């Protein structure tokens, strides 16, 4: 074989591989010039973009949200492609896509992730889309970073305490506990009354130990103070963690408890108290073997350390953001429709019990007459605070450092609460930038 | 004296025509596409990921300033020792446990047992289950609140209340090892069974006639015959387990309190949860260096094995 033959062979092989890789495209015959038809009237090509979210992944909400996508796509000449992720995986998938330049379309975000996503520099400013749509001020704030409206609020609520009234009644707990001492007494009564019931399914699995935040606030801790210093390891946070572990040690809570497990057990009538977002009612009542469970769920203002303190809760919510790039405006219009169209938002509330974020939807009869939502809003959301890490780009990492150290203390691999929280503070401080 | 390739046609001292390639040139050109592919998909990513270990690079902020050994120093001063310990415990445990069980299974399946053909197929089932699915099954078995294991032990009266198998470092690692053993031992059993079937029956018979009991036949005939298979199986298992990710991540995410965080989990968490590519790259460099030792042993063993067979 000479050089020319070999070169020709390699080129031929390359072309063959290229045509195979390109599928039918390379082999498709070119249209014959003689049969060229007159060009059809111009029809605008449908705007194509993706919608990313866990709402189109989870069984409870998937059909509802994909239904909105289809209806909107049909009415607006748009093709909205689904990109579902589990809740726990979505943030890192979006960060990867943003850093690789492939993130596009609209995405559902937990409000705690916004600072991280905004730091990638790939989010579109949605200020123009937030105007005159009647969003509540609290909702708009949940989608802002340094005054820029990166997210349109989809639902705003809180993570608070819910109780199964039937189990409380059976244990002789006649009124909702208002202080930590009363709460402990109630848990002990429940435990004594029925050892198979978990008195308080507080989170003990590392993934959801951010719930320690509201107990730290309850005991007077601040996590990050007004000057931006990490205060974990102060008296309030140490007292909170020691108390939390004491509940575990006394069998008033269970180990390895995560939100999924707590919901399942609450649904089966095996949990008296647990913490969740307002969305919990729709989830735990679905397929529950407990008759009329929906009527037995009571939103409870978190017990306070001493009378007169404000009950603590963690602000919680979902926003929709849009990535800069092709069809970003079309994606922003979809985000606006999804979060503020009266029919869509009230239907979303009806199907999933997720509170809307516009004044008009909140005033709708369907929402106003829902006593569970109004109770939850007045008892829990009214005094809810934002996640203290949510302002920082490294919020996810900061939260995981805290949960790892708290978990280490709960499972006994760190001897004291003080040591666990001091280490958390030392590791979180360098991330405050 | 001119050396002539045994397969190349003799040129008879004729001069090569102008434009005709020499054999070495042809060989280089033929190897070039494969070499380019290798460079693109193995060498470049490897070198790039090693380079990242020397940069201050984040998935969120980008960046990329050269920081020398700062990332390596940070990793060595913090998580390296516990992560190394966990990796060694997992890699050795997940190699030896399935090896002994797989060896036992292979010996049983090699013997005259009823339904041998069916059992040989049935033994493979755990290996056929995708690793992530098997890990979820074991996660549910060990779950503290609704796990089958607790229910079973409580029904027998062994436990009075549920035990949290995945909440303490020791039992969590043991649980992960049990899950991994269940998934892996069939592969080892199949490999060793194949080796057992190559042992000539007359050697076993001769040993028996010479008065060797079962134990002696096992130690003096079976084991020497399986030496190479055992070596390859153990080394490959060790290498794979050194890199293993999914069972640990699904069952414990490296917890509790990092008690099951191995190199693979640590690199994943540092890169894709803390978004710190620089430190993840530094961890990757150390991980690769350690793994290289095992790979070198494997290559040397493999070459020696080839010589033995030659």
Image: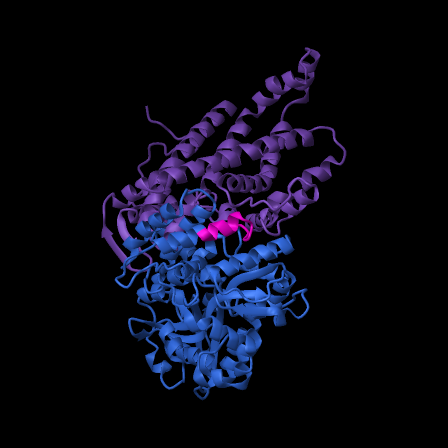
> What colouring method underlies this structural image?
by chain
Q: Position of residue A399 (x, y in %)?
A: 39, 57
The answer to whether A23 is drawn above or below residue B83 in the figure is below
The colour with which the image depicts chain A is blue
Q: Position of residue A85 (x, y in %)?
A: 49, 63
The number of callouts visible is 0
Q: Residue furthest top?
A: B210
Determine if the magenta segment contains residue A181: no
Q: Is residue A198 visible?
A: no
Q: Residue at x 40, y 48 (%)?
A: A417
| Residue A137, quarter of picture | bottom left
Along the line of sight, the residue nearer the viewer: B306 or B100: B100
Give the side of residue A313 with respect to residue B179, left or right.
left
Along the line of sight, the residue nearer the viewer: A109 or A135: A135
Q: Is residue B252 visible?
A: yes
Stretch of the chain drawn in magenta:
A243-255
The answer to whether A266 is drawn above or below residue B17 in the figure is below
Which quadrant does the N terminus of chain A fall into? top left
Which quadrant does the C terminus of chain A fall into? bottom left
Q: Residue at x 46, y 25 (%)?
A: B304
Q: Residue furthest right?
A: B114
Q: Position of residue B142 (x, y in %)?
A: 59, 46
Give the side of residue A384 with respect to residue A265, left or right.
left
Q: Position of residue B154 (x, y in %)?
A: 67, 44
Q: Residue furthest bottom?
A: A41
Along the line of sight, the residue nearer the viewer: B128 or B35: B128
Give the side of residue A198 with respect to residue A228, left or right.
right
The chain letter corresponding to purple is B
The answer to whether A154 is drawn above or below residue A159 in the figure is below
């Amino acid at each position: 074989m000479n050089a020319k033959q070999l070169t020709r062979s390699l080129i031929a092989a390359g072309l063959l591989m290229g045509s195979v890789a390109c599928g039918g495209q390379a082999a498709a015959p070119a249209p014959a010039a003689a049969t060229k038809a007159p060009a059809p009237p111009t029809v605008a090509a449908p705007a194509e973009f993706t919608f990313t979210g866990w709402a189109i992944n989870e069984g409870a909400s998937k059909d509802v949200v994909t239904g909105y996508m289809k209806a909107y796509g049909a009415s607006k000449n748009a093709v909205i492609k689904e990109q579902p992720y589990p809740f726990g995986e979505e943030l890192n998938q979006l960060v990867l896509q943003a850093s690789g330049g492939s993130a596009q379309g609209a995405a559902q975000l937990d409000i705690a992730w916004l600072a991280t996503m905004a730091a990638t520099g790939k989010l579109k400013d949605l200020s123009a889309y937030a105007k005159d749509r009647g969003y509540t001020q609290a909702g708009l704030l949940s989608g802002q970073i340094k005054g820029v409206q990166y997210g349109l609020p989809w639902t705003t609520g809180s993570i608070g305490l819910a109780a199964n009234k039937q189990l409380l009644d059976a244990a002789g707990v006649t009124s909702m506990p208002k202080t930590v001492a009363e709460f402990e007494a109630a848990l002990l009564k429940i435990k004594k009354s029925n050892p198979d019931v978990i008195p308080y399914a507080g989170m003990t699995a590392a993934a959801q130990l951010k719930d320690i935040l509201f107990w730290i606030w309850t005991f007077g801790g601040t996590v990050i103070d007004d000057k931006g210093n990490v205060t974990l390891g102060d008296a309030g946070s140490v007292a909170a963690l020691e108390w939390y572990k004491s509940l575990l040690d006394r069998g008033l809570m269970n180990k390895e408890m995560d939100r999924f497990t707590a919901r399942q057990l609450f649904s089966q009538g095996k949990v008296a108290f647990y913490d969740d977002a307002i969305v919990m009612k729709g989830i735990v009542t679905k397929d529950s073997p407990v008759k009329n469970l929906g009527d037995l769920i009571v939103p409870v203002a978190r017990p306070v350390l001493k009378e007169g303190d404000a009950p603590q809760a963690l602000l919680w919510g979902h926003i929709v953001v849009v990535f800069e790039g092709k069809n970003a405006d079309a994606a922003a219009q979809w985000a606006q429709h999804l979060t503020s169209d009266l029919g869509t938002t009230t239907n979303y509330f009806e199907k999933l019990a997720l509170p809307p974020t516009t004044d008009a939807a909140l005033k709708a009869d369907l929402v106003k007459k829902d006593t569970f939502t109004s109770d939850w809003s007045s008892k829990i959301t009214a005094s809810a605070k934002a996640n203290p890490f949510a302002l920082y780009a490294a919020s996810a990492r900061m939260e995981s450092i805290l949960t790892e150290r708290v978990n280490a203390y709960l499972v006994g691999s760190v001897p004291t609460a003080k040591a666990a929280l001091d280490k958390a503070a030392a590791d979180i401080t360098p991330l405050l930038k | 004296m001119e050396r002539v390739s045994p397969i190349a046609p003799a040129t008879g001292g004729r001069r090569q025509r102008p434009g005709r390639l020499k054999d070495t040139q042809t060989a280089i050109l033929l190897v070039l596409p494969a070499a380019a592919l290798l460079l693109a998909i193995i060498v470049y990513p490897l070198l790039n990921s090693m380079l990242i270990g020397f940069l201050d690079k984040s998935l969120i902020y980008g960046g990329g300033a050269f920081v020398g050994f700062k990332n390596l120093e940070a990793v060595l001063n913090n998580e390296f020792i516990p992560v190394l310990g966990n990796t060694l415990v997992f890699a050795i445990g997940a190699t030896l446990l399935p090896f002994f069980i797989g060896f036992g299974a292979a010996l049983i399946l090699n013997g005259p047992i009823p339904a041998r053909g069916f059992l040989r197929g049935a033994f493979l089932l755990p290996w056929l289950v995708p690793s992530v699915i098997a890990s979820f099954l074991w996660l549910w078995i060990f779950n503290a609140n609704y796990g089958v294991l607790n229910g079973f032990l409580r029904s027998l009266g062994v436990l009075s209340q549920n035990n949290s198998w995945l909440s303490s470092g020791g039992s969590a690692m043991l649980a992960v090892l049990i899950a991994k053993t269940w998934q892996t031992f069939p592969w080892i059993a199949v490999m060793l069974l194949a080796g057992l079937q190559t042992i000539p029956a007359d050697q076993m018979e001769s040993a028996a006639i010479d008065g060797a009991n079962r134990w002696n036949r096992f130690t003096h005939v079976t084991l020497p015959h399986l030496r190479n298979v055992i070596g390859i199986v153990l080394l490959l298992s060790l290498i794979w387990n050194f890199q293993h990710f999914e069972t640990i991540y699904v069952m414990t995410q490296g917890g509790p309190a990092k008690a099951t965080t191995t190199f693979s989990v640590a690199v994943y968490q540092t890169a894709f949860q803390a978004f710190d590519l620089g430190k993840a790259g530094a961890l990757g460099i150390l991980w690769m260096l350690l793994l290289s030792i095992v790979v070198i042993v494997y290559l040397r063993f493999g070459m020696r094995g080839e010589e033995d067979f030659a």
